[in-house]
Image (cartoon, coloured by chain):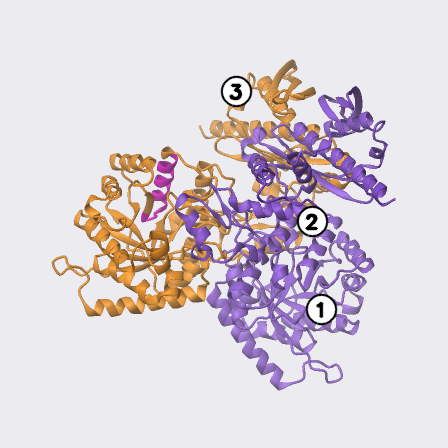
Chain colours: A purple, B orange
Amino acid sequence: MTTNSSPQLWLYDTTLRDGTQREGLSVSIEDKLRIARRLDQLGIPFIEGGWPGANPKDVQFFWQLQEDPLKQAEIVAFCSTRRPNTNAATEPMLQDILAAGTRWVTIFGKSWDLHVTTGLKTTLEENLAMIGDTIEYLRSQGRRIIYDAEHWFDGYKHNPDYALQTLDAAIASGAEWLVLCDTNGGTLPHEISQIVQDVSSHLSLVISQEPMTKDKGQRTIPQIGIHTHNDSEMAVANAIAAVMAGAKMVQGTINGYGERCGNANLCSLIPNLQLKAGYSCITEDQLTQLTEASRFVSEVVNLAPDEHAPFVGRSAFAHKGGIHVSAVERNPLTYEHIQPEQVGNRRRIVISEQSGLSNVLAKARSFGIELDQQKAEAREILQRLKDLESEGFQFEAAEASFVLLMHEALGGRQKFFEVKGFQVHCDLIEGKETSNALATVKLAVDGKNILEAAEGNGPVAALDAALRKALVNFYPQIATFDLTDYKVRILNGHTGTAAKTRVLVESGNGRQRWTTVGVSTNILEASYQAVVEGLEYGLLLHSQAEAAVKASS
Amino acid sequence: MTTNSSPQLWLYDTTLRDGTQREGLSVSIEDKLRIARRLDQLGIPFIEGGWPGANPKDVQFFWQLQEDPLKQAEIVAFCSTRRPNTNAATEPMLQDILAAGTRWVTIFGKSWDLHVTTGLKTTLEENLAMIGDTIEYLRSQGRRIIYDAEHWFDGYKHNPDYALQTLDAAIASGAEWLVLCDTNGGTLPHEISQIVQDVSSHLSLVISQEPMTKDKGQRTIPQIGIHTHNDSEMAVANAIAAVMAGAKMVQGTINGYGERCGNANLCSLIPNLQLKAGYSCITEDQLTQLTEASRFVSEVVNLAPDEHAPFVGRSAFAHKGGIHVSAVERNPLTYEHIQPEQVGNRRRIVISEQSGLSNVLAKARSFGIELDQQKAEAREILQRLKDLESEGFQFEAAEASFVLLMHEALGGRQKFFEVKGFQVHCDLIEGKETSNALATVKLAVDGKNILEAAEGNGPVAALDAALRKALVNFYPQIATFDLTDYKVRILNGHTGTAAKTRVLVESGNGRQRWTTVGVSTNILEASYQAVVEGLEYGLLLHSQAEAAVKASS
């Protein structure tokens, strides 16, 4: 931990490890790095990055972070205890952990006797040695240890003595955190409360009786953490019950992603702990970034955001029906449990449109455009924005398209080119290797008509190639533009192929990147909109840069 | 209540009233009736049907149920207290309530002084009269009353004396249930606990002091109910805290549908209360219908089911990763908090690149295919699986494609049809309203060549339409197939349009749904693969069903 003032609670994010266990979710190394850096910004002190011994991709992930470290968060490598009847020092998996080069390591071990005998197929004694040896070894190599007591609550209920022995092994070998995991997700809050209190008492007893570690008399007094799952829809409630019973670390994931029914949702936990229960986790300012962080992560992993999510969901502060509306605006706390701005969300009045104006003004300002709140333009932009958003456009993730929209409303949208039409033709003959697509585009530049055709490995690739081919003679800088990312989301997929498609296209020119959006029931048309706006914005940036150079010379 | 043995807890469903407040949800009268009858079957004792005074559709809904009543559940009409300074007997809204002809009525009233003065704009005294008059009037007309104390917890925290006075008004006029509502959804479990205990104590005091009603000395001893919202992700935990503090009625909705972040989810509440906390709500047999009821309701309201929902979600008992699988099968309770069958769900072993051989065997078994672990086929299937997954296919989410893969490896993949080729042509002329796509497909069925063309609002829609058009004469059952969902994932989007595309298509035949996958750099080709396999799998299901019928006759 570096610059944050001492938090009363320590947040531990496992989106990149436990979160990725969610069925259907898979992330690239690049995705993981982007998420890690965003969580770093959010002020999360511990970020569990993955299991390098089990996942080759994770090895690369940790190496990249050694080259270009996070600013304040500790990145943590995760691993199991050594295998039965082996030597920790020669366990290859632990070598991978050390190679990850993290200051902190999380080791998980078995707390439930049944898992030891039937799962690991070893003795209860050997399991204790596995826990102790693994932690001691890693500490001898300079690592600080967080110990995850797997299946803690079920294990404790079945055989409390043995469970406590496993914890003692972790304590004696110098673990700094003892994280009690409700791995099956079936425990209820009052049970969590009781058991955490028991552990707390046990800990006090153990500490009072002997030195914690064998290191030159240095006492490590471990603290209690909690790691819950949502199989009973209790993950958040359980975590809070644990905190109120003495836990000082809370493990969870952004948006509650995780296996089966998910992990404890940090997007619900942090505001509850900070705004209601009076704990300190991240700064107030960081808390206002919560909603954006939630949506960012869902975008990166390409999952639709949960609109009904507590605190950060689009509908979380949406008031339907006439009765409330004026009442809410006069005295929000009579209808809202917190102020949406505190978590970076906003109130939405489903009928009226006044609440959005300040957003538009702020956004415009961030692009160097000062809008006069009184003038019609500002309201026009807002109206256009809302109209488009109700059709499915989303400008949160496509700021370049929003900038073009503003320029249009202000009357200053430069016409670099005009697309008159396109045709795309795809062929697939069974037996032939691949299909190819042919696109023809008709443009007008400075009143001159151009017709150009190109091939591509798919209809969008062909369209993109044809547009560039047509434009590069007029705008040579287009040769430096690249389509760097392409995302598709089906907006009402349950209507099958009649669904609207939203396409986000990220373009770059080697120095900057920008994202544009297109929406249509026709995926090609949606792609074409986003691609065309991508080119337009790139040209806009270029002309602005040229103007700046001229102005300064 | 008629035939159920006395439940210790009373479930109260408000899916059809509060649930319909969910943004984007709207139901027809027919939909509501179908849901009501299903909830009746499930054993829910109270079903809140709507607000006939506010919603004309609801008037019809209640009339239909008078013609054709539910079997065991009480259908309840919902309404506010009379307006300030009016007469309950002449309040038109209350006439609508009476016309609904229900035995039970739920009346909601204000508990928070602020809401009375700034919202209703009346005096604190008048509000008490509104509560008392409304209940007395409806009772005089033979109705039994449930009183919903709106904004109870916030109101009690701000002005406990006044809040209790509002409750006293309800008690004195003969309400049988006092339902404490956490309308803003911001209360935490320990607060719920404390406040419910306070109310319980207050209730005992009031009862001991005087007769409850003015009716011929008949004492009505009201019981406490709880109605929670999920704005803090605590709705279920709060409801359970209330029950443990003495509440005997729990209000919620199926799948947690409701305004903003939703209501307490009955699909989590009922199993928690019944299987863990030892209460009795519905019969064991009815509980096994829970998963089906959950999916039925989501189908009727046309919302995608939440696959990660606790207890009833498709992923709730899905185990990923080789480690667990054998352990789970040997001793399920070491990895599962309840037996999935108890709520009508089932365990799923997820097939993914992390799968070992045991996953493949278990999966095959679940489709009725016994693979010999020793034989080459099993290993072949695993290898084919890993090869395809490294190319981008994902079988976790596309089980139907995996089944076809297995049949292929075992040499039994039926050839229903053969696609010889397709052509897709899209036009977009600037200025024209929308683009249209035209697809031509060439198939062979039983050696006969077919050429068919169709239009669609996009290339995939056109392709899908053309395939069906070609096949329906040979396989009439195809008319019952529907594309119900369509997902696109760009696999290495940072390479722009050269990226591989993975398409997941979900199809249904009215009774079952299945998902298939396609991968290609060409989005059309990927879509075509998934669509073709979707049709193939549907035909396979149909032929298996026919064979089963023949075998049993």
Q: Chain of mark 3?
A: B
Q: Badge 3 is on which residue? A: B476
Badges 1 and 2: C-beta atoms under 8 Å apart?
A: no
Which labelled disc corresponds to residue A1? 1
Instruction: Indicate the amino acid at tag 2.
Output: Gln
The magenta stretch is B31-46
Classify residue B154 as left or right of residue B216: right
Looking at the picture, do discs 1 and 3 lie on one chain? no
Residue, disc 2: B354
Residue A440 in sight in this render: no
Q: Nearer the viewer, residue A524 or A278?
A: A278
Amino acid type, residue under disc 1 in the picture: Met
| Residue A252 part of the magenta-drawn span | no
Q: Residue furthest right?
A: A553
Residue A545 position (above or below residue A207): above
Q: Residues within 10 Å of mark 3 (few under 14, many from 20)?
A: few
Q: The disc labelled 3 sits on which kind of residue?
A: Pro
Is B100 situated left or right of A359 in this image?
left
Q: Does dot 1 land on a helix, a strand or a loop?
A: loop
Q: Is B38 contained in the magenta span? A: yes
Give the label, 1 or 2, closer to the camera: 1
